[in-house]
Image (spheres, rainbow, N blue to C red):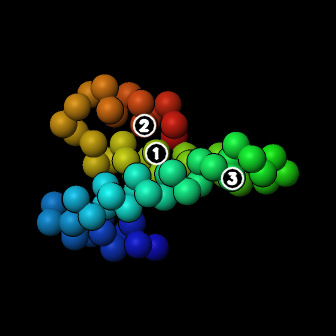
């Protein structure tokens, strides 16, 4: 998975990792709201993204709290 590759290359890959996660979250959020038959799958994907984001978020405690609710 791309996030694992980027995680292993931290801190140099932080900007790319954040950009990827923001894009992925936006892409997964739309089907979560519109394709109700697989809602549980989308929730799991959003939770995975939230856990990755929490793992690298150490600058702003408010951001970490937001992502912990997503996860």
Q: Earlier in the sequence, mark 3 or mark 1?
A: 3
Give how far across and how far down residue 28 sits, in percent. Answer: 59, 54
Per the image, label 3 sits on a secondary structure element best described as helix
39 displayed left or right of 71: right
Mark 3 vs mark 2, CA separation in Å: 19 Å
Give how far across and how far down residue 70 sits, in percent. Answer: 51, 37
Q: To which quarter of the image does residue 15 belong?
A: bottom left
Mark 1–mark 2 CB contact (< 8 Å): yes
Give how far across and how far down residue 65 sits, in percent. Answer: 38, 28
Per the image, label 2 sits on a secondary structure element best described as helix
49 displayed left or right of 60: right
Q: Which label number is shown at residue 67?
A: 2
- In this rendering, the answer to whether 61 lies above or below 67 is above
Q: Which residue is mark 1?
A: 50
Measuring 22% from the left and 59% from the top, which residue is drawn there?
14
Q: Which mark is nearer the camera, 3 or 1?
A: 3
Q: Earlier in the sequence, mark 1 or mark 2?
A: 1
Q: Which mark is nearer the camera, 3 or 2?
A: 3
- For label 3, the crowd category at 10 Å Cα-Cα, with few meaning under 14, some 14 to 19 and many 20 or more, is some
Measuring 38% from the left and 62% from the top, which residue is drawn there?
20
- In this rendering, the answer to whether 44 lies above or below 4 is above
Q: Which residue is mark 3?
A: 31
């Amino acid at each position: 998975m791309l996030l694992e590759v980027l995680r292993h290359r931290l801190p140099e890959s932080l900007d790319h990792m954040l950009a990827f996660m923001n894009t992925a979250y936006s892409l997964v959020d739309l089907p979560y709201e519109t394709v109700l038959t697989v809602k549980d799958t989308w929730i799991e994907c959003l939770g995975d993204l939230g856990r990755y984001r929490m793992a690298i978020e150490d600058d702003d405690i408010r951001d970490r709290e937001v992502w912990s609710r997503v996860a």
